[in-house]
Amino acid sequence: MKLSLGKDFFGRPYDRLSPSADQSPKWYCEPCSMQKNLQRDYRDIRGEFEKLKQRDGSLLDRPEELQRAQLRLREIVTLLSASATPQALLAPGEVTQLLGDIQARSQAQPA
């Protein structure tokens, strides 16, 4: 096993444990790996949105990060909706709800 640094959606480093020979870490199977990556991005964006709601110094205070997060949430909804595999890790409705909450908040904010 090896410990390596990964990067989250916002480019922050995090530790990850993977087999020594694995140059491109995956979870179990290709669809599961994709779902796990989508789930991680969703979790990162949701965490920053919670900080934004609490006025706790969120990366989503930056217009370019907010726009990037909204685009990624739309991509996640599209990928989950198009998948033939049942979604065990992340429900499209959760992502749609977060996207709607972020859009409503950004439209309510003065320019």
Image: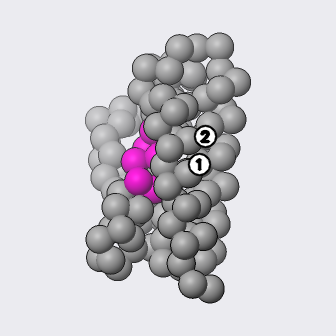
Work out whether 3 lies above or below 33: below
- Please state which of residues 107 and 42 is positioned toward the viewer in this rendering: 107
Pointer 2 and pointer 1: residues touching (CB < 8 Å)?
yes
> In the image shown, does 16 or 103 lie closer to the viewer?
103
Image point (62%, 51%), residue name: 72
Q: Give the class, few, some or many, for how many residues have Cα within 10 Å of label 2's Cα (few <14, many ≥20).
A: many
Label 2's element? helix
The residue pinned by badge 2 equals 76
Q: Main secondary structure of the magenta part?
A: helix
Residue 20 falls in image quadrant: top left
Position of 107 relative to 9 (above/below) = below
| Residue 17 in magenta stretch | no
Q: CA distance from mark 2 to mark 1?
A: 5 Å
**Position of residue 2 in the picture relative to residue 59 (left or right):** left
Residue drawn at point x = 35 percent, y = 36 percent: 18
Mark drawn on residue 73: 1
Q: Is residue 18 left or right of residue 7?
A: left
* Residue type beneath disc 1: Leu
Give the magenta-colored segment's residue range.
39-46
